[in-house]
Amino acid sequence: MVKLLVLAPRKKSISTNMLIYEAKKMFKSVDFVPVKEVSLEVGEKYGVLHGDNSLLDYDYVLPRIDSHRAGFGYHVIKMLDYFKIKKPYPAESILIAHNKFATIFEIKKQGVPVPKTIYTQSQKTAKEILDMMEFPIVIKLVDSFGGKGVLFVEGETAAKSVFKTLDILNQHLLIEDYIENPGEDVRGIVAGDEVVASFKRVAAKGEKRSNALLGGKPTSYYLTEEEKEICIKAAEAIKSKICAVDIIQSKEGPKVIEVNLNPGLKSISKTKTGKDAAKKIIRFCHNQTKR
């Protein structure tokens, strides 16, 4: 019996339900466990448990560790790493993918084009950095997601006000070059060594961020060969076999602005270029159990 475990924040997530639906067609057994309900045991023996049940008897684990559960989720996946449980990424990927600077740093090392990005914890240093930047600029929270915590700042006065606020909140500063764009980006979903689906996201009227949580609308889009190669390299950089890569077009060509370890599937399922994304992800997972 080939058994799959899905670890995710909540079962009612549309994307998680889509994956479970497809998984039940390919796996003999599919179980869902909320990450927060897992317990880890270290003593006379090691254990990864849900209640009294061990989570070490699965042929494959599909984790969907979000930013809110990244700290604990890291240790869960680290334990599964120790027991060599098959899954799409190691614990290290959580640390990379849920920190925007770590993501940019790792994918740049792989030769993936990215916007100029500066990271600091100091408000004083951030103000000095402004002299090296051209406005508008983008300011991001290091652990932001879904477009939240991403600010487009038009001038120095506004930037300093944002710096002061983030300093009070003890937030680190990520300052990024603004790429002139009509509020569009493209997303490629990677499973294994191929891009299995893609689409374009178009921002709502009056909004520069194209994220679905902020009203962005999906439309069909086929990646170019260059964009596909970029997606594969970005996935390799964060050491994950499953992820979504967001690309924005600049005057110098495509640049990666984000890599998502737990791609949402609701938006892409509405386009003809992404309707089988969940099925293709699950097929990849199933194929991995045969190796």
Image: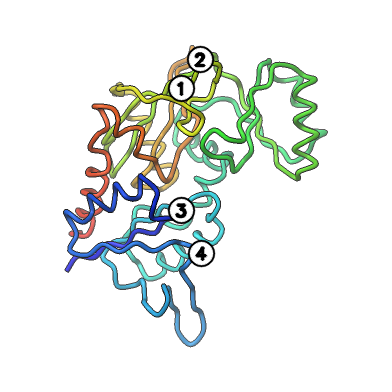
Residue position for label 2:
181
Q: Going 49% across and 78% down the picture, which residue do you hit?
A: 41
Q: Nearer the viewer, residue 158 or 83?
A: 158
Q: Where is residue 278 in the image (x, y as percent from the top left)?
A: 27, 43
User: What's the mark number on residue 75?
Assistant: 4
Question: Which circle's residue, 1 or 3, is located before the other in the chain?
Answer: 3
Question: Dot 3: within a 10 Å radius of its alpha carbon, few (fewer than 14), some, or many (20 or more) residues?
Answer: many
Q: What residue type is labelled 4?
A: His
Identify the secondary structure beneath mark 3. Answer: loop
Q: In the figure, is residue 51 to the left or right of 122?
A: left
Q: Which amino acid does label 3 sit on?
A: Ile
Q: Badge 3 is on which residue?
A: 65
**Which circle's residue, 1 or 2, is located before the other in the chain?**
2
Kindly identify which residue carries mark 1: 248
Between 31 and 179, the one nearer to me in the picture: 31
**Quadrant in the picture for the C terminus:** bottom left
Q: Is mark 2 on a helix, strand or loop?
A: loop
Q: Confirm or deny contact between disc 1 and disc 2 (CB under 8 A).
A: yes
Q: In percent of the image, x 67 and y 36: which residue is there?
A: 119
The type of residue carrying mark 1 is Ile
Identify the residue shown where x is 49% and y is 12%: 251
Q: Where is residue 240 in the image (x, y as percent from the top left)?
A: 39, 47
In the image: residue 165, left or right of residue 235:
right
